[in-house]
Image (cartoon, rainbow, N blue to C red):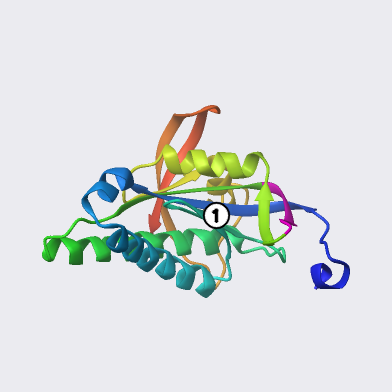
Amino acid sequence: MELKAKGQADAVQIDLVTVLFTDFKGFTALSETLSPRELVHDLNECFSGFDRITGKYGIEKIKTIGDAYMAAGGLPTPNSTHATDVIQAALEMRDFVAEGKARKIAAGLPFFEVRIGIHTGPVVAGIVGVKKFQYDIWGDTVNTASRMESSGEVGMVNISGTTYALVSGVNGPSTAPGIPAFTFTPRGRVQAKGKGEMEMFFVDRSSTE
């Protein structure tokens, strides 16, 4: 609305959002075995599925960069459920890719595998562009979320210690009626490119749900 009214939109600082990155393992190798049409079709199928999942949880898709997908919870309107929303979406994305992989294997076709990383912190959000406007976010939180993805493992959702503290109850009760239960696998301090060692956890659904 602000963009329409005055032709621009001011950048804003949002104190706490949860950022998600996905990336496909072996995408370059896969691109050499599929035709361009097949590659774009499979990528579009995955990203369309991701769009449905982020929409379901009220998460903002920020952009795709090649075979990477970026989204964030807690913006443009801040909320208190962004961390759990993003983790739930990430787990559904992982399962969506796993189901696609199983179908491809059954048909003897090449398949995608995915790594997903999540981090929570402050960002600057705004709209950039002249001919093509795009809502985007910037800041160390974005870079760290990307490192959570690249430091993760295929088929796993890797979260930072910051996100873990928000959703695990470390900083007080985090569960309430309707909030999902998660299980966490501590990874200790893992080397993250350009960040040094960072506390990381794999997260999954609780089997007691």
The quadrant where residue 153 appears: top left
In the rendered image, residue 127 lying in the magenta stretch gets the answer yes
Question: Would you call the spot at circle 1 few (<14 residues within 10 Å), some (14-19), or many (20 or more)?
Answer: many
Tell me the residue at 52%/68% (across/down).
179
Q: Quadrant of the N terminus?
A: bottom right
Task: Please indicate, yes or no, whether residue 178 appears anywhere in the rendered image.
Answer: no
> Does 13 sit left or right of 89 as displayed?
right
Tell me where the magenta segment starts and ends, as one range. 122-130
In the rendered image, residue 129 lying in the magenta stretch gets the answer yes
Q: Magenta segment, principal secondary structure?
A: strand
Depth order, front residue of 57/126:
126
Depth order, front residue of 190/69:
69
Tell me the residue at 23%/56% (across/down).
111
From what the image shows, is residue 150 above or below residue 164? above
Provide residue 62's location: percent of width, then percent of height.
59, 59
Depth order, front residue of 186/8:
8
What amino acid type is highlighted by mark number 1?
Val
Depth order, front residue of 1/118:
1
